Every structure is written in C-alpha cells, then in structure tokens.
Image: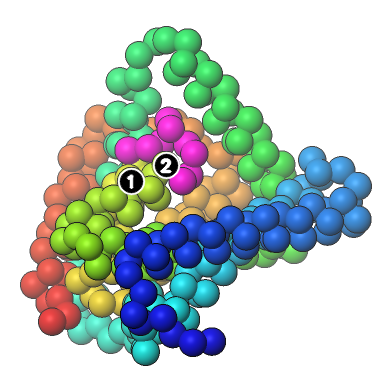
C-alpha cells in the first residue's frame, strides 16, 4: 500500500475516522454472525466474548494499523512500535509508577463516586453502568481454566494492545502533528476516558490516559503503556476471579495513608522516566 506522506493532518484524520466506521461495522457484523450461529442467544457468555473481541479488533486494533501504513516511510515509528531497552533506573521508575498507580486509581474512583450529586441523571448513569457491569459479570461467571484463559485474551490482552495503539499511537500521534505533546496527551486521554463510556469512572480512566500518554512520549515506545495497561487489566481480572466473578466496585484504600502515598510514588517514578527520557 502506498504511503501518503504528503497528506495534510486533517485529511489523514478524516480518513482515520472513515476507517474506524468501516472497520467497526465490518467486525460488528462478523461478531454478530458468529455469536448468532454458534450460540443462538446474544446474552450467552460465549456470544458476549465473541462480540467483545470483534468489537475491540474492529474499533481499536485494525484502524491504527491501517493508518500506520499511510503515515510515513517508516510506518511503525508513527505508532511507536519500536524496541525498548530499560536500564536499572528506568525499570525502578516504572515499578514505582505501577505500585503508585494502583493506589491512585483506587482513590480517584472513590472521589469520582463520592462527589457526584444525588440527581436523576446520576442515577441514570449508575443504572447504565450497572447493566455494563452485569454483562461483564456474565463473562466472568464460571471461570474454569479455559474460560479464564479466554477472558485473559479478550479482557486483558486485546484491549490493552488495541486501545494503546489507537489512543497513544494513532490519536496522540495525529494530535502531536498539530499541537504540543502536552495538548496531544491531554486530548487523547480525554478521548480515552470518554471512549470507555463509564462516566462514573472517568477520573481514574482519565488519569491512566494521561499517565500512559507521557510514558509513550518520554520512552518513545508504545510497548511501555501497553505493558502497564496489561498489568492493570490483569489485576482487575485476577481480583474478579478471586472474588467469584464479581467486580469490585468499592474503594478499599481511600482515606488510608496509601491513598496519599500512591500519587507520590507515581510522581517520583515519572520524574525518573523523564530524567532518562529518549532524546
């Protein structure tokens, strides 16, 4: 396929949106056909898994890979698909970030819920997220080894790789052509939060989007945010598995010393990554 290096950012962005629409429609149809043919009911756990994986592939994975081929003469560099080597200091910084992020996400989830007004639209949002959570709990039910493996692929690996290529690779890369990297990170993180369609969890998701964005920029590689995204998703799946398939919705550390210590760990780790950033 010919690389369109002469295209303007606007033309590339419009093409990207069209690719997303076409790809999502195509893979939605594929998912529906498979789910209907093999399971009969779209509420079956197996059908939901197929719909989940085809939706992730169609919306998040395929469009950035197609865009990558159009972007420049070295297409993998556009998405940050490059080998990364970490020295001891960088690895220690990432460990601090991972440890601190768990506590920070937990605290932000508590803040997100605690300060919402008691209005009808908030109740409607809670009902909407409850229906999404119910669908997830169907996927998490009866997690024998085979279904646990399937869930690990569908709920951990595919979303982490696809969403990072999409938001930190394609979206952040496109915005970075027109704006400063701070603005590109902020806008792509906002899209990341809104794209999850979980308004009651927007603060922790927005935090992760910003965190992954700076790690993508400072390390020069998409593999670092993919790895942290994988760890976050794997931790959520593991906690659900240990909790008999139930998703944890209550904060366990908000108000404790860890809720204040977590952001400090993240900031110290980010400083270490920034100090050793790629030129």
Report the Cα–Cα distance between label 2 and label 1. 6 Å
Q: Is residue 21 visible?
A: yes
CB atoms at circles 2 and 1 under 8 Å apart? yes
Residue 191, image x, y percentages = 38, 48
- Magenta: main secondary structure equals helix
Q: Is residue 143 visible?
A: no
Q: Which residue is mark 1?
A: 190
Task: Single out the residue that lies furthest toward the top.
Answer: 119
SS label for mark 2 = helix
Would you place residue 224 above or below residue 230 in this image? Answer: below
Residue visible at 28% across and 61% down in the picture: 175
Residue 35, image x, y percentages = 82, 53
Residue visible at 12% across and 59% down in the picture: 268
Q: Which residues are magenta?
A: 195-203
Q: In front here: 119 or 228? A: 119
Mark 2: few, some, or many residues within 10 Å (few <14, many ≥20)? some
Left or right side of 176 for 116 = right
Q: In front here: 109 or 43? A: 43
Residue 160, image x, y percentages = 48, 62
SS label for mark 1 = helix
Q: How many marks?
A: 2
Residue 112, image x, y percentages = 34, 29
Q: Quadrant of the N terminus?
A: bottom right
Left or right side of 190 for 64 = right
Would you place residue 239 above or below residue 222 in this image? Answer: above
Task: Single out the residue that lies furthest toward the left.
Answer: 275
Residue visible at 51% across and 23% down in the picture: 126
Mark 1: few, some, or many residues within 10 Å (few <14, many ≥20)? some
Q: Which mark is residue 72?
A: none
Q: Which residue is mark 2?
A: 194
């Amino acid at each position: 396929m010919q690389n369109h290096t002469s295209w303007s950012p606007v033309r590339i962005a419009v093409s990207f949106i069209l690719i997303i629409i076409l790809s999502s429609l195509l893979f939605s149809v594929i998912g529906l056909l498979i789910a209907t043919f093999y399971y009969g009911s779209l509420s079956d756990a197996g059908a939901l898994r197929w719909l989940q994986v085809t939706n992730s592939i169609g919306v998040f994975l395929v469009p950035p890979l197609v865009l990558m081929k159009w972007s420049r003469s070295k297409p993998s560099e556009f998405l940050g698909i490059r080998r990364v080597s970490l020295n001891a200091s960088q690895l220690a910084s990432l460990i601090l970030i991972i440890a601190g992020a768990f506590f920070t996400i937990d605290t932000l989830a508590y803040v997100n819920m605690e300060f919402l007004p008691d209005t009808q639209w908030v109740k409607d949002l809670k009902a909407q997220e409850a229906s999404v959570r119910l669908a997830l709990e169907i996927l998490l039910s009866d997690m024998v080894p085979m279904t646990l493996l399937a869930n690990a692929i569908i709920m951990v690996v595919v979303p982490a790789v696809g969403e990072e290529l999409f938001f930190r690779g394609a979206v952040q890369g496109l915005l970075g052509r027109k704006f400063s990297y701070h603005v590109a990170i902020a806008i792509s993180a906002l899209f990341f939060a809104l794209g999850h369609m979980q308004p009651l969890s927007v603060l922790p998701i927005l935090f992760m989007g910003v965190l992954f964005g700076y790690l993508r920029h400072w390390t020069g590689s998409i593999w670092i945010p993919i790895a942290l995204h994988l760890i976050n998703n794997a931790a959520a799946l593991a906690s659900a598995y240990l909790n008999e398939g139930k998703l944890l919705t209550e904060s366990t550390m908000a108000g404790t010393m860890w809720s204040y210590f977590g952001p400090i760990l993240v900031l110290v780790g980010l400083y270490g990554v920034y100090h050793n950033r790629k030129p």
